Amino acid sequence: MSAGGGTRAIVAALAANLGIAATKFVAWLLTGSSSMLAESIHSVADSGNQALLLIGGKRAQRKATPEHPFGYGRDRYIYAFIVSIVLFSVGGLFALYEAYHKIQHPEAIESWQWVPVVVLVIAIGLEGYSFRTAIHESNHTRGKTSWVQFIRRAKAPELPVVLLEDAGALIGLVFALFGVVLTLITDNGVWDGVGTAAIGLLLVTIAVILAAETKSLLLGEGATPEDVRKIEQAFLAGEGVERIIHMKTLYLGPEELLVAAKIAVPRSERADEIAAHINEAEARIRAALPIARVIYIEPDIYHPGSAPPAGAQTADAAAPTAHA
């Protein structure tokens, strides 16, 4: 997934949310609607989240140092996790608190009654534009993968975060519109509180999903089964590699994969021949999977009956070689 696509989606979402937040705050000040206040805070939280994603993307570009020899690619995961916390606390919990207060002490919308409706309709249009941009950028890399699988498997966190935020924002605007319109029709402020509560529950749900996915990335995820097969085929495509004894992979960042493998080499080969075959294998792996930028290969003699260590990703560690 290209960082450029994610950045375009973030910038589009940030611009939309800043404009939406300003108009929602004006509507809240004019009407006192709790749904408008909850949506205003939601838009402010979203704007802050997009700024955090941009900061994380910038910091992840720093070069490796002796203290951080594998670079700073995971900064993008850290900032995405912070986004989930902000969305949960600032967006979701605040909306639930405001809903509780509004339901306990309902107030009808007395002045500028139809301003919130106009503002919410405009906001739906702006959020729709942002959501469309996120979908367009995601489709470049999603392929035939379902949206659920795309969000679960994506190694770059920006687009899934923006997709979920924009989807949540659109649904939340519908909830807010529902609460405001029913409050105006019935002159009962409880409906405004109900709409606010629905927004809060929605934001908390999205925040939990984001936290779970980014936590998995922070802990460290390996390559997908498809990419593991590409690496195995690249290993076995040349001479000098009898089999893969075991292999592990780890994402150091969204666009950088570490590959560590122990391979079986012929007993009769000299050290210089083994080194040449290892270099050739590294070149084949990088050609098959360009994100495999850090590769460690340990040559060994295969002993039949030896079991791979726990966590090895090779599909069949004791499979025979694919070449003659």
Image: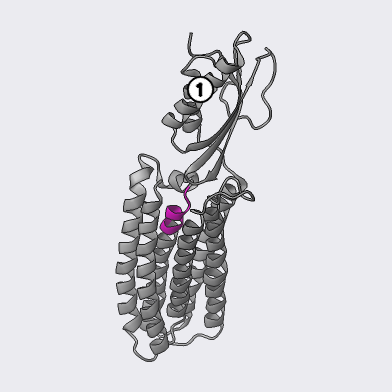
For disc 1, the neighbor class at 10 Å (few under 14, some 14 to 19, many from 20) is many
Q: State the residue lying farthest toward the front.
A: 272
In this rendering, does residue 205 appear at all? no
**Which residue lies at the image location 39% right of the left edge and 91% below the top edge?**
110
Q: Position of residue 13 (x, y in %)?
A: 38, 64
176 on left or right of 292:
left
10 on left or right of 301:
left
> Does the segment drawn in magenta span residue 85?
no
Which colouring convention does the figure follow?
Answer: one colour
In this rendering, does residue 132 appear at all? yes
What span is in magenta? 156-163
Q: Position of residue 15 (x, y in %)?
A: 35, 69
Helix or strand or loop: what does disc 1 sit on? helix
Q: State the residue lying farthest toward the bottom.
A: 111
254 on left or right of 178:
right
Is 117 drawn above or below residue 236 in the view shown?
Answer: below
Total marks placed: 1
Quadrant in which residue 208 is drawn? bottom right
Residue with the mark numbered 1: 235
Is 156 drawn above or below residue 278 in the view shown?
Answer: below
Is 100 drawn above or below residue 166 in the view shown?
Answer: below
115 on left or right of 218:
left
Q: Amino acid at mark 1?
A: Phe
> As rendered, which of 70 and 272 lies closer to the eye?
272
Q: Position of residue 256 (x, y in %)?
A: 50, 42
Q: Position of residue 131 (x, y in %)?
A: 35, 59
> As rendered, which of 263 and 222 lies closer to the eye?
263
Q: Main secondary structure of the magenta part?
A: helix
